[in-house]
Structure formats: C-alpha cells, structure tokens
Image: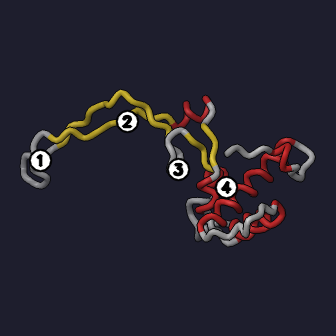
Amino acid sequence: MEFEAERAELPGDTDDEKLDTAVKCSVGRSARVSYNNHDGERDIPDDLRLATTLFSAGHMAPYEHVCRPMNDFERDIFGRTEWAPNPRNASFTGSNASLTWNNMARRTYYLGNFNGWLQARKLIPGEKDILAFERP
C-alpha cells in the first residue's frame, strides 16, 4: 500500500515537512502493528505522538521499518563487492585449514538490514550507540 500524502492532508508547509511527517506517521504505525493497536482507525496526530515518544526513549526498531530505495549517490558510497569463503579442505582447526576468497562478482548495498534500501533509523545521528544517544 502506498502512502498518499495529498489524500492524508499532512500538516506542514513544505515538501520536506510533509515527508518528515509521513516518515513519523509510518514509524508510529509500524510500532502499532507490533501490538495490533490501530483500533480500526488511523489517527495522524496520535501516530506522530507515538513516533516522538519512541524517539525520545531511544527505541529505534520502528525507524528501521520505514525506508526508501538508495539513490545512485548512496549506492556508490555503500556498494561493496561480495566475497565468499572457499575452504581448501574441510578441517576448521587442522594445521592445513585455510580459506581462499572468491569474488562473487556481485555488488551489495547495505546500510543497515536491507540491501539497497536506506532506513529512516540510519538518518538519526548516534542511532548505533543507544547509551550515547542524545535524547531531545
């Protein structure tokens, strides 16, 4: 299902504000799905409050679910050639145990959990270190 900002009449004067509202609304709705608490209706102000509460508490998991495809610039930055181990023998610890690495000739684009996607969580400064995360 696509989120249609125009039909939802999101608050905000600029496109960036509307996008920020849509992301926060999606975060709130993603969080609600985990405990099935939509109560049969969609309440944008309530979703925004929940997203703010989650953010303030440092609860980043719902921010992982909201994502978009990486653009060409991001794919250039995060693209990596995939390599795979190729064991020369079956022994893991023996004296002859060694690995060679095969270039799989395939590119991956990970920044977070999804290949080729940018999660909203990754746009939050300090999101990786929850103890150092500065709450508003």
Does the residue at mark 4 contact the one at mark 1 (Cβ under 8 Å)? no
What amino acid is found at the position of numbered circle 2 in the picture? Glu
Q: Tell me if mark 2 has few (under 14), some (14-19) or many (20+) residues whose alpha carbon lies within 10 angstroms of its own.
A: few
Cα separation, mark 3 vs mark 2, equals 16 Å
Label 2: element kind: strand
Residue hosting label 3: 112
What amino acid is found at the position of numbered circle 1 in the picture? Ala
**Residue drawn at (61%, 71%), measured in percent from left and top?**
35
Residue hosting label 2: 82
**Residue drawn at (19%, 42%), measured in percent from left and top?**
99
What amino acid is found at the position of numbered circle 4 in the picture? Ile
Residue hosting label 4: 124
**Mark toward the viewer: 1 or 3:** 3
Label 1: element kind: loop
- Earlier sequence position, callout 2 versus callout 1: 2
22 is higher (above) or lower (below) than 104: below
Does the residue at mark 4 contact the one at mark 3 (Cβ under 8 Å)? no
Does the residue at mark 3 contact the one at mark 2 (Cβ under 8 Å)? no
**Residue 73's spot in the image, x, y percent?**
62, 31
- Earlier sequence position, callout 4 versus callout 3: 3
